[in-house]
Every structure is written in C-alpha cells, then in structure tokens.
Amino acid sequence: MEGFICCLDWRRYVLTIFVCFAAIKSAFAVTHYSVPEELEEGSVVANLAGDLGLDVKKLIERKMRLDTIGSRKYLDVNKETGELFIVERIDRESLCPAKTSCYLKMEAIIENPKRIFYIELEIMDINDNAPHFRRDTIDLDISEATQAGERFSVSNAVDPDVGSNDLKTYHLSDSDFFTIEIQTGRDGSKFPDLILKKKIDREEQAVHNLILTAVDGGLPSRSGTASIIVHVLDTNDNAPKFKPENYEVSVLENSPIGSRVIHLNATDVDDGLNSELIYSYSLYTSEKTQETFKLNPTTGEITVKGVLNYEDFRIYDMEVIATDKGVSALSGQCKIKILVEDMNDNHPHISIKSFQSPVSENIELDTVIAVVSVSDKDSGDNGQVDLHIPENMPFKLRESSDNYYELVVSEPLDREKVPEYEITFTVTDRGSPPLSDNETMTLELLDVNDNVPQFSQSFYTIRVMENNAPGSLLSSLTAFDPDLHENQYLVYFIIEKEIANTSMSMLFSINPENGNLYALKTFDYEIEKEFLFHIEARDSGSPPLSSNVTVHIIIVDQNDNAPVIVSPWRAHGSVVEEKMPRSTDKGSLVAKVIALDTDSVHNSRITYQFLQVTDASLFSLDQYNGEIRTMRMFSYKDSRHHRLVVVAKDNGQPALSATVTIKLLTVETDVKAYSDMTEMPLEYDIFSDINLYLVIGLASVSFLLLITILVTIVLKCQKPKHSKTAPPSRNSVISERNSTIADSTLVSNDAYWYSLFLAETRKGKLVVRQPVPKGSRYIVSSIPRGTGLSETSDSAASTLQVGQV
C-alpha cells in the first residue's frame, strides 16, 4: 500500500514536473515570421491568434496587446480577427543598415491569465536601391607623356541592398584610350581601376569624357553612373607655326605712322606657357626694314614706323621668329614681303610753252593758239593724265606728241558776241581719287569792221504837232555798231530827197554825231500832213559800212481853225431872215445849219446848240445835223416874229465855235396849195414842163451870184494859207431861205461828215450815212434841179453831194 502510495506520489511529481516544463517551454517559445520589406500599410502578416492557439473571441476580454522592441511600432494585432498586420512601411536598409540579415522582435501579451508570447519577424531584402557613387563626377589629370598600361584608381559605387541585390559589376563607356579592371576586396566589395590603353595627345584631344556604370544583381537589375573627366596635361612637344610661312602684303605710301600693315598670328597647339609666344626679327632682317616697320613682340602686329615713299623704296623683306615660353623653348619663323603701293600723291603739272594773244576775230580755222605740255611723277594709272578745256568753246586740243598738246581754233570767232575767252587748261590723272591741276589763260580778240550800224527800228514814225517852234527836237535816231573804236564811231546823214521842189535838208536837220533830228520850220497840218525820207548811219571803219532807215513824219493837227457856217447863207453879218407859212405842220423843216471845220477829223466834229430861242416849245434843233424843225403847229397866239441863235462848236481842246442868228417871219399862205405840195413824193424831182424853162433861168442867175459871194467870203473870213502842196479851199455860196442854193463847189480838208441831208422841202430827206476815211479830202457841191420850180413853192432847195478826192 505504501508502495502504491509512493508510486502515486512519484507519478504526481513527474506530472507536475512535466506540466511545469511544458509551461516553461510554452512561456519561452518564439513565433517566427518572414516578410519582404516595403509592404504597404494594412498588409496582413499572419493569423497570430490561430498560430498561438488563442480564442479569438476572448482576445478583447483578455486585453491582448503587441509591444515592439525598439522605438517604432511597425506591426499590430487586430483583436477582432487575431491577425498580425503592417502599421508602418518597413525599410530594411533604414532598420538594419550594413547588415546582411534583419529581424524585428516583438512581444504579444494577454491577461487572465497573463501570458507572453515572443514573435520574431524577419525582414527580407528586395532590390529597391540602385548602386550609387560617392561622387557624381570624377576628375583625373593625366599627362600626355604617360605611357600605356598605367592604372588610375577611381571611386567605387555602393549598394545598400544585400545578397543578390548587391553591387555586381562595372561598365565603362566606349573609349579608344581607356578601359577598366574590377578588383574585389576582402569583404567582397568591388573596386574599378582605370587603365590607359594607348598614349594620349593633348593637342589632339585635351579632355576625355567617360561614363562609369555600376550594376547590381537584382531582378530587374538597377544601376548608377558617374562621369569620369580626364584632363590631359600638356608637355612642350609642339613648336610654334605660321600659316602660311610666307606673306606678301601691300601698303600704301604715305601711310600714317602707327597704321597696321599685318597682324601675324603664329599658333602653338601646346597649353599654358608652352603656347605663349614672343615675336622678334631674325638676323636676316635689314636695319632699314626694322627702322621702317615696328614689330609688337606680344601681339605680332607690324605697324608703320617710318615714312613710306613709293618713289624712294618699293619692296621690304623681313623674317619674323615666334618663340614659346616653355622650359625647353621651341620656335618657328616666317618670311614677309611688304610691297609699297603707289599712292596718287603727286599732282599733274601743266606747262604753257607758247600762247598767242590777242588774235584777230577773223582768224582762220585750225590756227594754233597755244602749245601745252603735261606731266605726272606717279606711276601706272596715277601717272596717266588727260588734258581738257571747257566745253562750248570754239577751240579744241590736238595731241602733237607725247604729253604735248596744241590749242587750235575750231569754230569762227566773233568779238561782238564774246570779246575774250578765259581758257582753263585742266589736267587730271587717272588715279583714285584723281588729282588735277589747271592753268587759266586769257585770249583777247581784236576787232575788225564786220558789222554794219543797226537802228533799233526798221521804220520810224514820228508825230509832230503843227505850229511847232523851228529848231525843236523831234526824235533821237540812234544806231548801234557792235564793233570797237573807229569801227564803232557813227556819222548820221539825211538822204536828200525833194518834195514839191523842197529839199529835206531845208525842212529837217540831223546831228551827225548823235542822230538827233530837228525841225527847221513850223508846220501847218492844213497844208502839210506828212513827210517820208531816209536817214543813213555810217561807221568810220575802213572800208566804212552803213545802213539807212525810213523816217515817217506825221503832222498832228491842232484845233486852230474855228468852224465856218456855210448854210444858211448870210448876206450881211450873221443874221439870216427866213419866212415860213403859219400853216406849217409839226416836224416841218425850218432851216438847216451847216458848218465846216478845216481841222482833222477829231477837231472837226461839229455839234449844234440853241443859244437863244424865242419859244423853246415850238422849235427843236438836231445837235448833229443842224436841222431846225417845228415841234408843233403854229397857233394864233404865237408871235409872227421869232429869233433863233444857233452855235456850231467843234470837238477840239479848247473848243472853237461860230454862231448864226435866224429871224423867222411866219406868213399866211394858201393852205390847199401848200398841202398839195407837201403831199408830193420826195424821192424824185418832178416838175411840170411849164416851169422847166423858169427853173433853168433862175438857176443860172443864182449860180453866178453864189460864186461871187463865195469868193468874197473865202478872202475875208478864212484867210487861207497858200502852199505848194495843197490848193486853198472854197466855201459854198448859199442864197436866202426863199431862193435856190447856188451851184457852187466846197472843198474841205479832212472834214467830218456824219450825215448829209437833202434840202428838198422843209421836211427834208435823210441821205445814207457814211464813215469818212482818215486823211481824205471831200468836195461838197450843190447841184441845181433839172426841172423848174413849182408855182406854189415859196422856195426851192438844192441837193448837197459828197465826193472823195
């Protein structure tokens, strides 16, 4: 029994130990999970409650929580589902830097009873990082003298990923001069070495740009790059060079000091001091050249230092050396030929070898006037010259020999048009710009008597007022002679001409020196109206030349003659007695006043006016034809006696006049007989045969009486002036009112007649009005009737006719 009890105790002890061991074992057990890094938030890792054997429904009651070892909480437990999920994105490289493995340890704690579970979460690496270099640009300086096979260390790349995602290899961009070799360190890291494949030349390529690429082993793989810039260091292995090595330049003579001739530009492909050059003359350059041209040792510019004269020195040769500043200096040289170009700096020269002046204006064509030579010290076109004279001159140049010219007459000369010529000889070279010189000579022309005197007019009309004073100046008839000296001195003559046995020299005189024309006598327009003669102007040349001009002297009328009343006829004094029937009709002709004026047309225009009239309402007077007519019939109240005073006034300044007084007596007559007479047609002179012989007898007696009276009046009243050129005028003789006008003739000089009237009856009839030509002479005649007088007529009238002489 005790044994049995002992056995039970032992079993109970073992069971207790077993339970304790199981409890300890369960208390210290670790749950392991593996997840890749960079999972998104909320991602489920595992069902922790199920893996731990916990009742999901009691997780909230037992207050399950998850503690993260460390400062950050990356995971948590969903108490409703018991799932372990990602709270924050996990970066393995940040959590476990420089480690190949990475674990996240956590504790899951529950209450009632309290239990602790250990959880280990392994963070698996993914290829989320590309390799990268510590420096993006790697600069290397390599001398161009470095031999092939030389190694150069460059910076390696790093990749925070691990395992197969870590850096695997390097690649170099294509290059003819460089390659790489990869070295592996003890820790497995890889380093690239840059190896020079063949010798480099800085002058060919001074800089090499390479691209180094680092590639990891992930899938897909990632890479990073760095630029390797290889700077080739220079060595003084190149000498300076001129291109070209021979120069030929031109420079104008007289170029100013300091003007540039050429800028030398030698090149040295080296760098730094090895390419800095110094220019200098070589020993082969003459001192003359070095004194004329200056070489700038730094820039290589050659400038003018002295005076350049093409005529003295035309070509300069020099040699210039260019030396670099390297340790072992190298040099190069070139040759320069400087050609001095001729500049148009010398003016052409004119030399007048001979010049003939003055010359006669009638010199022959092609006569040599002058000989001229020209020259120019320049060369080429600058030394070629051309000689000119002004255009539009009657001369031309003719080349006689090399640079010699003759000036000859090419057109006829006329001193009167151009008395002298300013001839300018202009010589111009053919340079650019051209230079010229000139010389001016004056050629005078000698006059010859080749021009006749010329009057300003071919015909002179001179108006002279009558009654002029003897010796008065009429006009100055001046001629012009364009010649000179004695060929220009003129003498004036009147070419003799007789008019009516009178010589022109007796009427006119001319001053032989100045051509002033004078009148030697007093002229009367009524006797002499015009003169026509010639005047000659003669020069004093040898032989003399002359010309003449026609002179027309016109005597201008003055109002020096008063009008003369020729009708009605006044037997004694200036009073005329007339008789008129009282039964005369209205408009009947009472009397016709006719006055004559021997002056010219203008001064002889006559107008008539009443100075006195007994009854102004009874009589009217026509101011142009002098007709006095009744304005009405006579009444018993009218006076039997009427007195009419008429004045005849000319148109002169001042006006002259004459008056006539008409005493009119009205008488009683047989009304029937008078009426029959007035009703007869007036166009024709019709008389009965019974009265024919009576009329002829009466006309003959009247004609003799009128001739006697007319001669008496002319001698006493008009006092005519006798002249050989014009006969004296005669006035008509007119009878009393009751008698027929006598047959007589009146000659009037330049009388002005606007109209003529027939004195057939007291009514009268108008004759055709005609203009009177200027200067005409008219004859006014009274023509007797061819038939006898009517028995019933108180008077008979005659017809006045006008005829041109």
Image: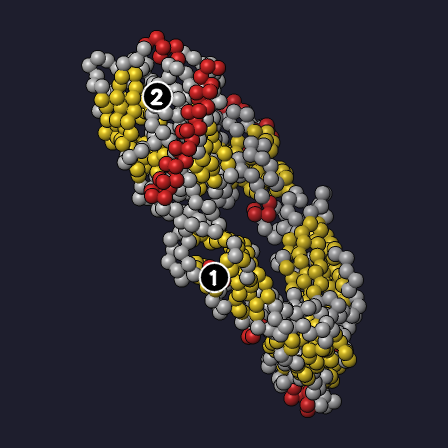
Image: 537 above or below 526: below
Name the residue nearer the viewer: 675 or 186: 675
In the image, what residue occupies the spot 46% across and 26% down?
Answer: 784
Name the residue nearer the viewer: 773 or 661: 661
Image: 636 above or below 181: above
- Label 1 residue SS: helix
Name the residue nearer the viewer: 681 or 464: 681
Left or right position of 795 against 433: left
Name the residue nearer the viewer: 121 or 446: 446
**Mark 2 or mark 1, earlier in chain:** 1
Image: 504 above or below 421: above
On residue 674, the disc is: none
Q: Residues within 10 Å of mark 1 (few under 14, many from 20)?
A: few
Judged from this view, the residue extending furthest toward the top is 672
Residue 4 in the image: state x and y as whole percent.
Answer: 59, 29
In the image, what residue occupies the spot 66% across and 43% down?
Answer: 126
Q: Which residue is mark 2?
A: 589
Instruction: Name the residue type under label 2.
Output: Leu
